[in-house]
Image (spheres, grey):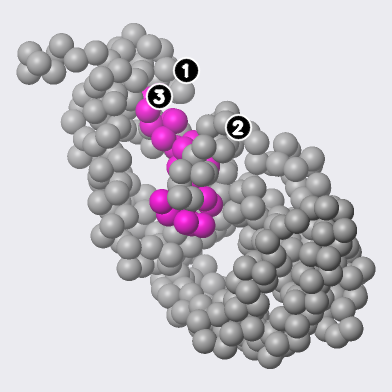
Amino acid sequence: MWLIKQISPMGKSLLSFAFLIILTSLMVWVLNPVIIPVLVSLVLYVCLLPLHDWLTNLGWRRDMSALGILLMMMFVVLVPGSLVLAEFNEQAMLWQSKASTAGQSLNELLTQVSAQLAQWQFHIEVDQLKANILSAVVSDEGSFLSSISAVIMSIASSLLLVPFITFFLLRDFESLRNKSLNVLPNKYFELGWLMYFKVAKQTQGYVRAVLIQQSILAAVAAMGFWISGFDSPVILGLIAGILGLIPYVGPALGLLPPFYLVLANHPVNYDAMYAAVLVIGVAYLVDNLLVIPLVVARFANLHPLVALLGIIIFGNFLGILGMIAAIPILAISNIVFCQLLLSFNPKKFTTNVASFH
């Protein structure tokens, strides 16, 4: 006890924060087999909570309100969801069937680029790049394109759990939250509730803002691809919106599907490539100039350098999922650590609690 009292508030905060990180990592490890359905269910819970609260305010019981939302979700999954999934799968098979043509077109394009750069006395090694790209596009076994259908079906199968997990979250999350926080000792009771409400408020706002952001991005991109005359403009727009979740590299990845479609049609219409760049550029221009400042920025109060380094580090250890989750994890960590630091300074913590109320 004497040793604990000798630790500074910063040291106590760091130890408590490290304990929370270990506890959270343990939970993620336990939930690893179902981590994607759980994360999707949590996102849906955040989005559907206002509807659930509205129904309960109308006099519906919590279980009946959650059941009604479950039936609505199952209808969406079984009817429109199955149609969208079938369309995605059909397009993936169609794109795979054109892989040979796309590979030949890419080969010609890289040869022309190499020759042009050589005329400008700018020599680059394109042979290895050409071999890697062609093997990924054309090969039938182990290639990216040949695995698209399998990946889609695998994700779809795991997402069948989502409506049921979301149902139990809507019905029981508040009672589970109350029971968990009521277990805290009296000394940390106010800290636990204050930390929960601040984290919940920022996380819910960020999730809803990002969903709005990506929906607008997908709609603008789909409209641009439709105007430009691309096949499957809605699917291309959805892909651009989903890839937009990946910070910094999302725009470049969003160009790959339309570029592939251009190369898969012979003769190649290179003007369509410029059109694809213009569409993605306009979509991200709208996103960065309008949507992010007005919708997203206030929920991710992080320094740009901290956000950039966090994305790189999380991406290095956790891949694409880590890059997507970096910003909300850093924002939540910032809130938790600041509240822990305040809690070990009684005067500041009392002032903070009073201002919150």
Q: Which residue is nearer to you in this view: 332 or 73?
A: 332
Residue at 24% across / 21% down in the picture?
A: 12
Instruction: Write down the region rendered in magenta.
Output: 317-339
Query: Does the segment drawn in magenta span residue 335?
Result: yes
Q: Residues within 10 Å of mark 3 (few under 14, many from 20)?
A: some
Mark 1 or 3: the one toward you? 3
Residue at 60 percent of width and 71 percent of height: 132
Residue, disc 1: 355
Relative to 21, residue 137 above or below: below
Three-letter code for the amino acid on which mark 3 is drawn = Cys
Q: Residue sitting at 26 percent across and 60 percent down?
A: 30
Q: Which residue is mark 2?
A: 304
Could you tell me residue 20's position as x and y percent? 28, 38
* Residue 13 in the image: above or below residue 35: above
Q: Quadrant of the C terminus?
A: top left
Q: Amino acid at mark 2?
A: Pro
Q: Are marks 3 and 2 in contact (CB under 8 Å)?
A: no
Look at the magenta stretch and give its main secondary structure.
Answer: helix
Hey, which residue is sitting farthest top in the picture?
347
Nearest the viewer among 166 and 64 is: 166
Query: Percent from the top left, x then y, of residue 256?
Result: 71, 67
How busy is the neighbourhood of tag 2: few (under 14 within 10 Å), some, or many (20 plus)?
few
Q: CA distance from mark 1 to mark 3?
A: 15 Å
| Residue indicated by mark 3 | 338
Q: How many marks?
A: 3
Distance (Cα) linking label 3 and label 2: 19 Å
- In percent of width and height, residue 38 lies at 40, 62
Disc 2 versus disc 1: nearer the observer? 2
User: Mark 2 or mark 3, which is nearer the start of the sequence?
Assistant: 2
